[in-house]
Each structure stands twice: as C-alpha cells, then as structure tokens.
Image: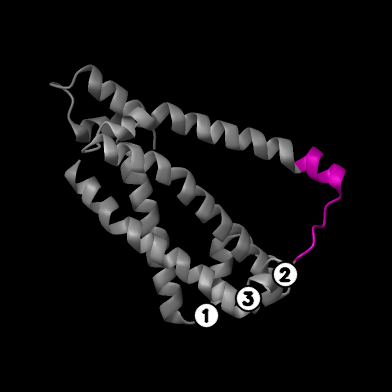
Amino acid sequence: MDGIRKLETISAPILVFLTMGLLIWSCVRAGGFGHMLSLNSKLSSSEFWALFFFPSLTANISFWATLALNIPDFTRYAKSQKDQIIGQLGLPVFMGAFTFVGVAVTSSTGVIFGHIISNPIDLLGHIGGFATKVLAIFGIIFGHCHHQCRRQCSGAGECIGQSQPLLISLLQEGRFSPP
C-alpha cells in the first residue's frame, strides 16, 4: 500500500499541472474564456431534456452512488480525521474543476479548429509538436496507472481481503478484482 500511496502523492500534482496546462493552452489559443465558452447550443430545449439531461442525470447518480459506497474503503487509510474530512471536501471541488476543464477545452476546440473535438486522443493529434505529444501521452499513461493501482486495491478485492486478512495479502487482493 505504501507504493500506491507514493504513486498517488507524485501523480496527483503532476496530473493537476498537466490539466491546468491544457486549460491555459486552450484559453490562449481561443482568445480568452469569453471566446472559448461562447458557442451556442445546437439543441432545442426539448431535445436537451429528452436526449441528454435524464441519461446524464442517471449516469451521475450511478457514479456518485458507487463512490459514496466505496468511501469507507478509501478513508480507512487516512492518517487522521482531519485528512479524511479534507479528502471528502476536496473530492467535489476537484470533480467540478476537472469537469469544467473538460467542457471548456472541448468548447474551445470549436473556436480553435472550427469543429468540436471531444476525444482527448484526437485532440492530442491536433495540438502541436513532438514534445507536447510526448508530455500528453506521459500524462495519460501516468493517470491511467494511478487510477488502475487504486482501483485494483479496492472494491471486490478489498472485501475479500478483509474477510481473511491473515491469509490474503494486498497482492492477492488485486487478483480478485476485475480487470
């Protein structure tokens, strides 16, 4: 668990830095926040509610419900009650911030390239030089490894491991988790 904790300690600031870099890049290239967030909706009000709002609401409820059920798995490793509270307060703030960056960068691609690019990998092909692409690929791989390491040590494997803590190690817990 110490290795995962070290990976998270290193990767979280790097991923925040790369995300802020992407937001700054899109803001500068689009000519400011006003331009990048000025695209009009292409949906009518009824299309928005029927086609997007309720499916999106269902997806968000299922995401947050799963997260709420797994909070004890994540908070049991907190060093103090204060750390646990900071983590639970920081989660919605960072989720909102990363959601805003996703929407803002996607919206800015309409201004920068003339069409919306919602896939980050496709956007990577349009961004720029070799060094930028290597840095972005590094960030994607780092974020994926960060996410997978935490996921493999929680959920089903954690439940099974806690049922027999003397017999099942942390590495064996990862084998019980779905890939």
- Front-most of residues 121 and 7: 7
Instruction: Name the spot of residue 147 as percent of width and height, x first.
Output: 37, 47
* Nearest to N terminus: mark 1 or mark 2: 2
The disc at residue 115 is 2
Report helix, strand or loop for mark 3. Answer: loop
Give the residue furthest to the bottom: 129
Q: Residues within 10 Å of mark 1 (few under 14, many from 20)?
A: few
* Nearest to N terminus: mark 3 or mark 2: 3
Is 49 inside the magenta-drawn segment?
yes
Report helix, strand or loop for mark 2. Answer: loop
Picture quadrant where residue 80 is located: top left
Instruction: Name the spot of residue 49 as percent of width and height, x first.
Output: 79, 40
The residue positioned 73% from the left and 40% from the top of the image is 53
Is 73 inside the magenta-drawn segment?
no
Residue carrying label 3: 32
Residue carrying label 1: 128
